[in-house]
Image: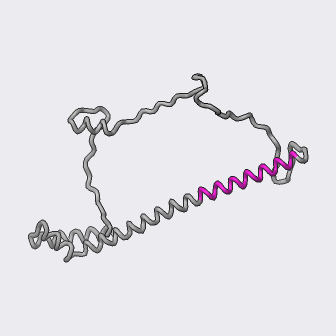
Amino acid sequence: MASHLFLAAQEARRLIESYGLDGEEAQITAESETRLPDVIARLIEAEVADEAAIEACKARAQELRLRAERIQARIDRRRDEIAAALEAADLPRLDCGTATVSLTTTRPGVTITDPDALPPDCLRTKTTTTPDAKAIRAKLDAGEDVPGAALSNARRTVAVRRT
C-alpha cells in the first residue's frame, strides 16, 4: 500500500507542477483529479480496522487474565481439599503414584494492621528521581543550556478527523 501511496503522491505532484498550480487550486486538483484521496482513504479504513483489532486484543487479554485467575482459584481449591483430606486421614505425607503430597507448615506471614504506628526502623523509604520535562523544556525554550538534555527535531504528524 505504501508504494501505491507514493505513486499517487507523485502523480498529484506532477499534475500540480505541470499546470503550475498552488494553494487552493492545487488542493482542488489533488482531491478531484488524482488517486491520492482514494489511496489515503483506504489507509484510514485500514487504520480503523487495526484500531478495532487492538481493542479486541485488549478485551481478549482481559478475558484471558480473568480465566487465568479462575484457573488459579480452582488449583487453590483443589490444594485446600487435598490438605483437608490429609488432615482428616491424619497423614502428613502420601505417595499417590504420580506425585507425593505432604502437609507443610509455612512461616507466619506479616500482617500490617496500622502502618502509621510502625516504628521508623520498620519502614523503608523509597525515593525516585525523574526528569522534569516541563522545567527542562522551559529552560531550553528560554535558550538556557541544560546538560543532559536537548530539544529533538520537530517532526510532522498526521491528524485524521473521521467523517
Q: Which residues are magenta?
A: 64-87
Q: Is residue 53 above or below residue 88?
A: below
Question: For this view, does 133 lie left or right of residue 118?
Answer: left
Point out the image quarter for the N terminus.
bottom left
Q: Is residue 136 above or below residue 8?
A: above
Q: Nearer the viewer, residue 86 or 40?
A: 86
Q: Is residue 4 above or below residue 79?
A: below
Point out the image quarter for the C terminus.
bottom left
Please name the colour scheme applied to the rendered image.
one colour
Residue 67 in magenta stretch? yes
Give the percent coordinates (x, y) of residue 122.
60, 25
The residue most toward the bottom is 33
Q: Nearer the viewer, residue 144 or 95?
A: 144
What residue do we see at 28% from left, 57% from top? 157
Question: For this view, does 72 lie left or right of residue 121?
Answer: right
Residue 138 in magenta stretch? no
Give the percent coordinates (x, y) of residue 75.
73, 53
Question: For this view, does 126 lie left or right of residue 4?
Answer: right
Give the percent coordinates (x, y) of residue 158.
29, 60
What residue do we see at 12% from left, 69% from top? 17
The residue most toward the left is 20
What residue do we see at 64% from left, 54% from top? 69
* Quadrant of res 159: bottom left
Name the dominant secondary structure of the magenta segment.
Answer: helix
* Quadrant of res 90: top right
Give the percent coordinates (x, y) of residue 16.
14, 71
Question: For this view, does 1 lie left or right of residue 73?
Answer: left
Q: Is residue 64 above or below residue 24?
A: above
In the rendered picture of this protein, how many numbered marks are placed on residues?
0
